[in-house]
Image (cartoon, rainbow, N blue to C red):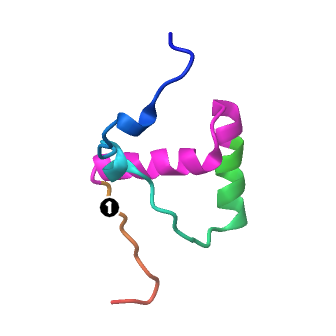
Amino acid sequence: MKAEYDLSTMKSRRNPYASQLKKPVTMRLSEDVVDYFKRMAEEAGIPYQSLINLYLRDCVMQHRKIHIDWAGKV
């Protein structure tokens, strides 16, 4: 291994993972929902935001759709 490396001669290249980066969003979630995911994340040993992302990704992969039946709506 060299004692020093000359990085000025290196060519830059695109990050192959740039398209997979996460997008920051702001959401309002019920406190009980956040607590639920925090508990599950603690058991799994991962950050709760990552757990929520994994859960939502699973919904996307399984093409899950929610059916909401609002009371009184026809």
Give the residue at x 57% y 16%: 3
- Give coordinates of residue 49: x percent, y percent: 59, 51
Q: Which residue type does callout 1 highlight?
A: Lys
Range of residues picked out in magenta: 40-63
Residue 46 lies within the magenta run: yes
Viewer-nearest residue: 48 or 25: 25
- Give coordinates of residue 28: x percent, y percent: 61, 73
Count of numbered circles in the view: 1
Crowding around mark 1 (Cα neighbors within 10 Å: few <14, some 14 to 19, many 20+) is few
Give the residue at x 36% y 68%: 67
Up the image or down, 69 lies above or below 64; here it is: below
Residue marked by disc 1:
65
- Give coordinates of residue 34: x percent, y percent: 67, 57
Q: Along the horizontal axis of the image, is 26 left or right of 33?
A: left
Q: Residue furthest top?
A: 1
Give the residue at x 27% y 53%: 63
Viewer-nearest residue: 41 or 62: 41
Residue 34 lies within the magenta run: no
Give the residue at x 30% y 42%: 16
Choose top left, top right, bottom left or bottom right for residue 45: top right
Looking at the rendered image, the quarter that the C terminus falls into is bottom left
Q: Along the horizontal axis of the image, is 20 left or right of 29?
A: left
